[in-house]
Image (cartoon, rainbow, N blue to C red):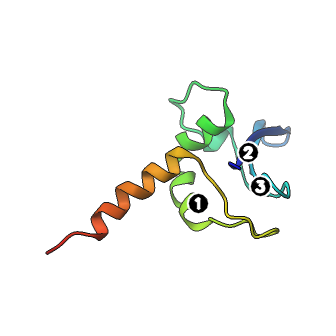
Amino acid sequence: MKVKFEDIGYDPFHNVNVYACICPDCGLHIFEFTDDDVDDKCDSDDPEVMFRSSMVHHGYMGLDNFCNRCGRKLDWGDYHKQHQKEHSKGENRKY
């Protein structure tokens, strides 16, 4: 199953909404992010689209492929698979 992306509430101290990437098996909040992390140009209310608009996801999805609680391999969706293919093309170059 794919990682869940959900709106998990509001932080009144920082005046921002809080979102999470959640393990589909055990419910662990793998990563939390806020409105401040989302690109200003993003006009979607979908937490997954908002996560992908931030620069945070570039490093995070590559580093965290397994849940720290249950050990499940995390499926970050089609976007992550496409991103991996683009980077693996450069590894097979002949010089």
Q: Residue at x 81, y 68 (%)?
A: 70
The mark that comes first in sequence, 2 or 3, is: 2
The numbered disc on residue 60 is: 1
Amino acid carrying mark 2 in the image: Lys
Task: From the image, tell me which residue sits under label 2.
Answer: 4
- Contact? badges 2 and 3 (CB < 8 Å): yes
Q: Which of 93 and 19 is in front in this view?
A: 93
Task: Report the residue that reaches farthest toward the bottom.
Answer: 95
Q: Position of residue 48 (x, y in %)?
A: 64, 39
Mark 3: which secondary structure? loop
Amino acid carrying mark 3 in the image: Cys
Residue 8 found in image quarter: top right
How many angstroms separate mark 2 from mark 1 (CA)?
15 Å
The numbered disc on residue 23 is: 3
Q: Which residue is drawn at 68% across and 67% down?
A: 66
Q: Residue at x 59, y 35 (%)?
A: 49
Q: Name above or below for residue 12 compared with residue 32.
A: above
In screen coordinates, is 45 left or right of 39?
right
Amino acid carrying mark 1 in the image: Tyr
Mark 2: which secondary structure? strand
The numbered disc on residue 47 is: none
